[in-house]
Amino acid sequence: MIDLTNYPNLNNLANSMGGVRKAALNKKLLENADNTWRRFSQEEVVRLEQEVKFAKPVMKGFVTQTAILYMNNHALFAIPVKDIIWVYVSTTTMKMNFIPYNKVHNLFVVTRDGEVHNIGTANTGGFSKKRPCDPAVAELQSLLSTVRPGIFYGYSDQIASAVHSNPAAVAQEVDMRSGSQPMQQAQPMQQAQPMQQAQPMQQMPPMQ
């Protein structure tokens, strides 16, 4: 990971989220966080250092036009906006003696390599019809639409299958929809209906 002491704005944001504690982290978690930072050029990090002064909080993440930043067990992850391909909500109903007692709503961001990042969790009652993550999805779409308009929002079986089998092809499709030149031609796919409820995707666990 970058040395945050060289970037006071990023360091201040990290401290506001509880601070980075490398000594307390498991090695795998630290490696995963470090890998997200390696995807940025030096110029992008410098730009991000300025952007975080105006970062928008969305659930447990902070959003700029360059990255979504979030803390996981005192490890600071940075998701490059240029790599985001899919944003969706997954809802799991918890039951006891077959009676629903809680619903867990998770907001997931998927990147071009198929990695899944959980940037927010909300709970509702077992019989609740509330969709507490939907406003966050709408806000992400609004914030990122000018820099990466091709991102898919909302769950669909078609996108889930495509991302699981060939995330690179989905990334090329999003690149084309966003006006970027893909490395090779990808087959077009329909955009998902926005913000549908979904069951968790066991094939792509969130970053640990």
Image: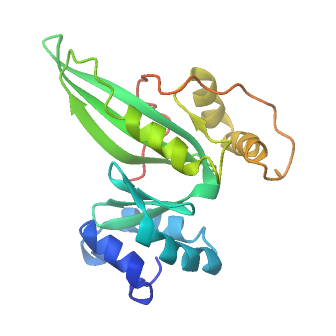
Q: Residue at x 61, y 36 (%)?
A: 152
Left or right of 47, for residue 107: left
Q: Residue at x 31, y 26 (%)?
A: 92
Which residue is more in the foreground, 76 or 26?
76
Indicate the position of residue 62 as horizontal and vertical percent values.
40, 59
Q: Residue at x 42, y 32 (%)?
A: 89
Q: Residue at x 86, y 47 (%)?
A: 184
Q: Does residue 42 lie above or below 204 as drawn?
A: below
Left or right of 103, for residue 75: right
Q: Does residue 45 lie above or below 6 as drawn?
A: above
Indicate the position of residue 156 as horizontal and vertical percent values.
56, 23
Say how many tags the image has: 0
- Residue 140, visible in the rendered structure: yes
Residue extending furthest top?
98
Res 91 → quadrant: top left
Indicate the position of residue 32 as horizontal and vertical percent values.
46, 62
Left or right of 44, for residue 53: left
Res 83 → quadrant: bottom right
- Residue 20, visible in the rendered structure: no
Which residue is more in the foreground, 189 or 99?
189
Residue extending furthest bottom?
6
The colour style of the image is rainbow
Indicate the position of residue 106 as horizontal and vertical percent values.
35, 37
Q: Does residue 53 lie above or below 184 as drawn?
A: below
